[in-house]
Amino acid sequence: MLEIEEVRSRLDSLEARVREARAAADVMAEGDASAASELEAELDGMAEDIATLKAGVSTSL
């Protein structure tokens, strides 16, 4: 089970990753495909954070 501080930390990380992913998507929308790797990295990070949260929270249910 995750401690509440770890949950909050992961949620903060997700929030920051969403901001970065949106910024990368905005760059891509302007026609610059070079931000695709940054977007992919942020999505991978979000998936990892979500998996950690889900595993840590579901064990406490």
Image (spheres, rainbow, N blue to C red):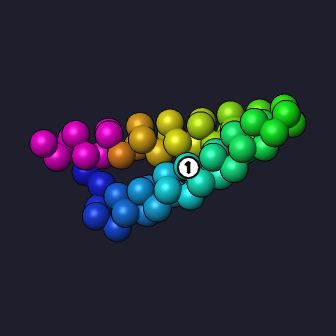
Tell me residue 2's x, y (percent). Answer: 30, 55
Tell me residue 54's x, y (percent). Answer: 32, 40
Type of amino acid at the residue the image marks with label 1: Val
Q: Residue at x 42, y 41 (%)?
A: 50
- Who is closer to the viewer here, 3 or 28? 28
Q: Does residue 40 appear in the picture of this structure?
A: yes
- What segment carries the magenta color? 54-61
Left or right of 45 on screen, residue 24: right
Residue 24 placement: quadrant: top right
Left or right of 39 on screen, residue 35: right
Quadrant housing the C terminus: top left
Q: Which residue is mark 1?
A: 18
Which residue extends farthest left?
61
When the figure is inspected, residue 2 is found, relative to residue 30, above or below; the finding is: below
Left or right of 50 on screen, residue 4: left
Tell me residue 45's x, y (percent). Answer: 58, 42
State whether the magenta stretch is mostly helix, strand or loop.
helix
Residue 8 placement: quadrant: bottom left
Q: Does residue 6 appear in the picture of this structure?
A: no
Q: Is residue 56 magenta?
A: yes
Q: Does dot 1 land on a helix, a strand or a loop?
A: helix
Q: Residue at x 81, y 39 (%)?
A: 30
When the figure is inspected, residue 16 is found, relative to residue 33, above or below; the finding is: below
Q: Residue at x 78, y 36 (%)?
A: 28
Tell me residue 5's x, y (percent). Answer: 34, 67
Q: Is residue 46 magenta?
A: no
Which residue extends farthest front?
30
Which residue extends farthest bottom?
5
Residue 16 placement: quadrant: bottom right
